[in-house]
Amino acid sequence: MSTSPEVDRRKTGSKHHLICDGNGTPFQVVTTAANVDDVTQTLTLVDAVPPVAGRVGHPRKRPDALLGDKGYDSEPNRRELCKRGIVPVISRRGHPGIHGLAKLRYVVEQTFALLHQFKRLAVRWERRLDLHDAFVSLGGRLICWRRLKKATT
């Protein structure tokens, strides 16, 4: 989980928050104002993950663990994630980072790069959030479709 880094806290604008799997397949993208703190979107993203079909039985709804940088460090969020059965792997503020987390965060940054290759998403032109969210959703679906197409050929 991460946010788009091309924003300044003092300026108007918007940024994307995203949750993806270990392969970089985007599950959910949320657009917020540029000055919204990252930690406020953690539970929103986790709760918005759609069920993932797989083995016979109930589809999985929750991930086993959630990786995040120091921007997502919060005791209330850690407690809520544990209540949901998710292990929070989030660096604590004021402490050295988790060894190897940067290598795992590369997957999220790569997903942002793929999403922002669509020019309409790199710079928000739509005034209406619902239109922008539709384009973001379409971009995520195109990323998934391209990966499926690549895997089947």
Image: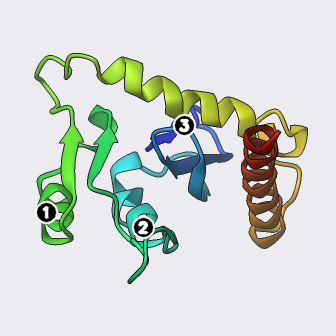
Amino acid type of disc 1? Answer: Cys
Which corner quadrant holds the N terminus? top left
- Mark whose residue sits in front, 3 or 1: 1
Q: Secondary structure at mark 2?
A: helix
Counting residues from the N terminus, which is met first, the one under dot 3 or under dot 1?
Answer: 3
Relative image position of residue 119 (x, y in whole percent): 89, 37
Amino acid type of disc 3? Answer: Arg
Amino acid type of disc 2? Answer: Thr
Which corner quadrant holds the C terminus? top right
Look at mark 1 in the image and give the residue it sits on: 82
Relative image position of residue 89 (x, y in whole percent): 21, 40
Figure quadrant of residue 44:
bottom left
Query: Who is closer to the viewer here, 9 or 110?
Result: 110
Q: Is disc 2 surrounded by few (<14), some (14 to 19) or many (20+) residues within 10 Å?
A: few
For residue 113, which numbered disc appears in the image? none
Counting residues from the N terminus, which is met first, the one under dot 1 or under dot 2?
Answer: 2
